[in-house]
Image (cartoon, helix red, strand yellow):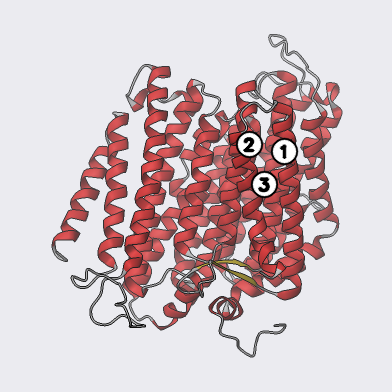
Amino acid sequence: MENLLPIVIGLLFGCGCYLVMRRNIVRVLLGIMLFGQAANLVIFTSAGLTPGEPPIIPAGETTITGDHADPLPQALVLTAIVIGFAVLAFALALVLRAYEKTGSDDLDTFRNSEN
Amino acid sequence: MPPSSLLLALPLILPLLASGVLLCVRNLPESRRHAASILTCLLIVISAALLLARVSAEEILVLEVGSWPAPFGIVLVADLLSAIMLLVSAVIGLAVAVYAAGHGTARFRGYFPPVFLLLLLGVNGSFLTGDLFNLYVWFEVMLMASFVLVALPGGRLQLEAGVKYLTLNFIASTFFLVGLGVLYGMTGTLNMADLAVKFRMTEDMNLVASSAVLFLIAFGIKAGIFPFYFWLPSSYHVTPTPVAAVFAGLLTKVGVYACLRIFTLVYGNYQDLIGSILLPLGILTMVTGVFGAASQFFIPRILSFHIISQIGYMIVGIALFTEGALTATIFYIVHHILVKTNLFLVGGMISRKLDTQALDNTGGLYRTAPWLACLFLIPALSLGGIPPLSGFFAKFSLIREGVATGGWVFVFFASAVGLLTLYSMVKIWNEAFWKDLPDRWHPPHRRVPLTMAAPSCALALCTILIGVFPASLHDLAARAAAQIKDPDLYISRVLGTKTETTGTP
């Protein structure tokens, strides 16, 4: 897994880059979404993958014993997923409104705010 | 809970509660909504002032949220830098809340107060947090509110600008998250004080450099540093004046604050590396920004490019990394927040008077509204660095520090950029105030309501006061700079390890 995940992350970032370079605005959003997922995987992977016990202290003990997974990165990733989801939902609504107003999903027509 | 800790939480609790209530109470008349938001902002100013007084006396305040000890739980920390930033942003919040009461369409005015308070919540949280992941969360709170504010008027231009603004800032957040992942993998902690301790022992320069650059990109996009600033002048100028003013004053400065905090506290031991990256970026930011401003003929766009060039000065101040340079940077940030917000507010009043902010169509305001000319001159001359206004002392102390450290390239560019800044301010002055109104343009010449003029007067008064009594702010900034230059006290307070260096308990 530790060798596979970096490849997956790279693929996600690569696909995200490709999509963000498109002129179609929905694809740009999809690209950003892939970036977000790749970033979450980076946190998940860099914290180390520990196939072992869940980080729960057994009844009657005061400290954890043996090999256990680090719960913090999972909490971080969970928070990041929720925030990313909220931003994406807002972005979709915004893009829909922009599409209704401009009548186009091509970013090249989004030049009016430049001058 | 001791009252000092409560003081730390107040700047977060107040806007959160008020905006929550305002979002729930749907049928409240508009004037009441604005009254509520102004009152909340006033309370934030008071609590921030109390916090500054307390921090000034007791050095550093720490609140362990949920009573978990520092490296494990979330902490709110206020040192002098945070407290100064909090107070200035609270003052800006109050000024803009008053200004917004009479501005814009009904739809805009109705939704503005609660979203604006959420924006202040995000800004205050970013200044107070002592934990990097929490900084990310506060950034997102701030960004969500700012997305809504950009898109709120719902016109085509605003929606286009909103899409650009959202895309770029979301990408910045991704960089930030990846940087967090790398840091956590390296050190196993995200508490800033704990990171600072762990970073003193690390040998792995590759990881240090890579995470530093990831943060630099993330904060650079938010602050508008050289290669990453293009979204800023294309989205700020289409937003309504109160929104543009608060963005111009606060949002980019939150990015600068994050740079200042992290590159001194966490990466303080690698200042050569950081400085060698930041110095050229800062100079390029200054130069490209001011050339952009010189080439524009639309007031908010000129002002937006100016934000960028002024950010350059602050970045160079961080790059020089002497105590004097950090003092100058903090002084510069305070001065810039007040002045830039005020200039946007004045731009809004020009547009109220003449129905346009394009310099081709403006003119004659010196005759028809001499008081407005006066209100414009104070922040404009201050931005250009004319003594005895606040900008002169900010620029002067930064350039003096450049001379002292032998950064002659910076001294040359800083002086040249100062002149060009003055040139573009003179351009606005000539076109909007001095020349006659062009014949083809027949503006309504509406009266400017008192709610719009009063905040601008108050901010101008602040600028003058700083100019007349620069020493008091300079001393405060110097103490803040000494604190961030030598973070041992910060670290010991946050991690709870009492050392001999701490003075009062």
Direction from residue B436 to residue A53 in the image, left or right:
left
Q: Secondary structure at mark 2?
A: helix
Q: Report the residue marked by disc 2.
A: B22
**Percent x, y of residue A27:** 27, 33
Give whichever of discs 3 and 1 has the lower sequence position: 1
Q: Do marks 3 and 1 share a chain?
A: yes
Earlier sequence position, callout 2 versus callout 3: 2
Judging from the image, what secondary structure is the residue with disc 1 in? helix
Judged by depth in the image, the label closer to the viewer, 3 or 1, is 1
Asked if the residue at tag 3 contacts the one at tag 2, i.e. Cβ–Cβ closer than 8 Å, the answer is no
- Chain letter, disc 1 residue: B
Q: Relative to B312, does residue B25 appear above or below in the rendering?
A: above
Q: Is residue B371 left or right of residue B505?
A: right
Q: Is residue B259 left or right of residue B471?
A: left
Q: CA distance from mark 2 to mark 1?
A: 8 Å
Tell me the kind of residue under disc 2.
Answer: Leu
Write the residue at 72% across / 22% down: B352
Q: CA distance from mark 2 to mark 3?
A: 46 Å
Q: Nearer the viewer, mark 2 or mark 3?
A: 2
Task: Say which mark, if any, is on residue B419.
Answer: 3
Above/below status of B368 relative to B119: above
Residue lying at the far bottom of the rendered structure: B500
Above-or-below relation of B435 to A39: above
Callout 2 touching callout 1 (CB < 8 Å): yes
Q: Say which mark, if any, is on residue B36.
A: 1
Residue at 52% in and 56% down: B282
